[in-house]
Amino acid sequence: MSLRNGLLTCVVGLGAALLPGCTASTTGMSIDPREHLPELPNLSTRRPDSPYHQLPDAGQPSPEKIKLANHETPMPDDPPRPKKEETPPQLPPLPTPPAGNPAVPPPVVVSPQERQQESKKTAPSDEPLVDALRAYLQKRPADALDALGRYEKANQEILLVALPFAARLTEGDVNRMSPREAAELADLMQGVEERLRQRAALRIEKMLFCRKIDDFGEYAVRETVNGIPTFEGGAGDQPGEPVQVYVELRNVSSRQVGDSYETRLAGSIELLDFQGQSAYRKDFAPEVHHGQSARHDFFVNCSFSVPRKVPPGRYTLRVEVRDITGLPADPSGLKQTPPPHHVAKSALDLQVIEPKPERSAAAR
């Protein structure tokens, strides 16, 4: 029996067994099994792969190797494609150096010793002041003097005092030095001060109205009325109330004459109304002051009486002091013009009121 006829007999038998359960009755029906043969597979064609057999047949491509439409990426099992060789971009040729130009020299290697020597040549030298201070710190005063010799003589005199003082401050705490050491430093500072005061500007340290003036720093301040010093004006031919002005000066000059020291001062006072107009002016004749020691701080008593022609109102008293020590003598003091730094000025406000009845009665 052929394979085809065997399969046909099995199919017919299976259909006859299931037919009574599917139809109500098959009596009277004649069915030719050959007219209802199912489409049997062609055994000569390739069967589908078994799930237990994953290896493809030799010579047949595997499904994974089938490329999808419009998909150019190769599958993992595909052999790598040979890469196309990319042509590098063509750069323009470098210009040929003209004939005669030397090639670029190799970098020059500088040793640390040569670099240090070169830095010493290019570095600016220290100031003589730095060399002098270093010499004082290293206890070489002779070398300090040589370094300071490059400055002007006036500068040398100050530096010869200031630098030892600065070097001394590096050797210990000022608050812990002994009284003897403190006195030595104070003398050094005084030496610097003496040299600087010769060029220091004259200055009015303090100026105020007083009831009385006894000496330097000894005075009684005049009381104010409503916060301003007030003085009675003149009546008839009588001048007004006396005005005493204490003027304390700093940096006055002293010139040694024989065994004493001389200080000469001149000055002026001026009353200005609130419009800046001068209502009164007085120049003081030069006064010579002698002392056994050189003076640096001094005072003058600028006293005057309210002029009888000055009407009641508010005024500004302007005081000018001129240090004319050492200038040619002039009894008036008006022709002696000291340098600008020997002239000091200051001002105070005051009020002039009507005289009291008893003063008016005395004037009549």
Image: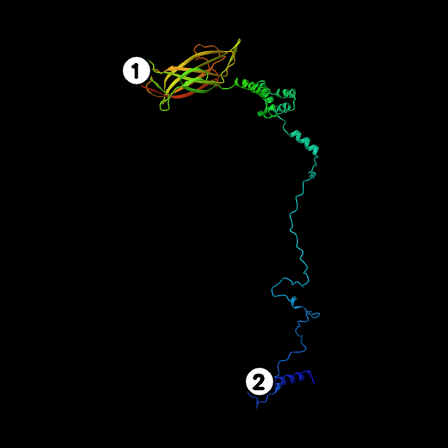
**Toward which corner of the image does residue 140 lie, by quadrant?**
top right
Quadrant position of the N terminus in the picture: bottom right
Mark 1 Cα shell of 10 Å, populated few (<14), some (14-19), many (≥20): few
- The figure's colour scheme reads rainbow
Q: Name the residue under label 1.
A: 358
Q: Nearer the viewer, residue 168 or 138?
A: 168
Which amino acid lies under the numbered mark 1 shown in the image of this protein? Answer: Glu
Task: Give the label on residue 252, or none.
Answer: none
* Label 1–label 2 contact, CB within 8 A: no
> Farthest residue toward the top?
258
Please tell me in which quadrant of the rendered image residue 179 appears: top right
| Of labels 1 and 2, the one closer to you | 1
Q: Residue 262's x, y, as percent? A: 50, 11
For label 1, the SS is: helix
Residue 270 location, quadrant:
top left
Position above or below: 6 against 172: below
Q: Observer-nearest residue: 151 or 296?
A: 296
| 102 sits left or right of 186 in the view | right
- The residue closer to the viewer here, 171 or 14, is 171
Q: Is disc 2 placed on a helix, strand or loop?
A: helix
Q: Residue at x 52, y 18 (%)?
A: 197
Which of 158/78 is in front?
158
Residue 52 in the image, given as x and y percentages of width and height: 68, 71
Q: How far apart are marks 1 and 2 (CA)?
A: 162 Å
For the C terminus, the image quarter is: top left
Type of the residue with mark 2? Gly
Residue 316 x, y percent position in the rendering: 38, 21
Q: Name the residue under label 2.
A: 21
* Point 41% across, 14% down: residue: 283
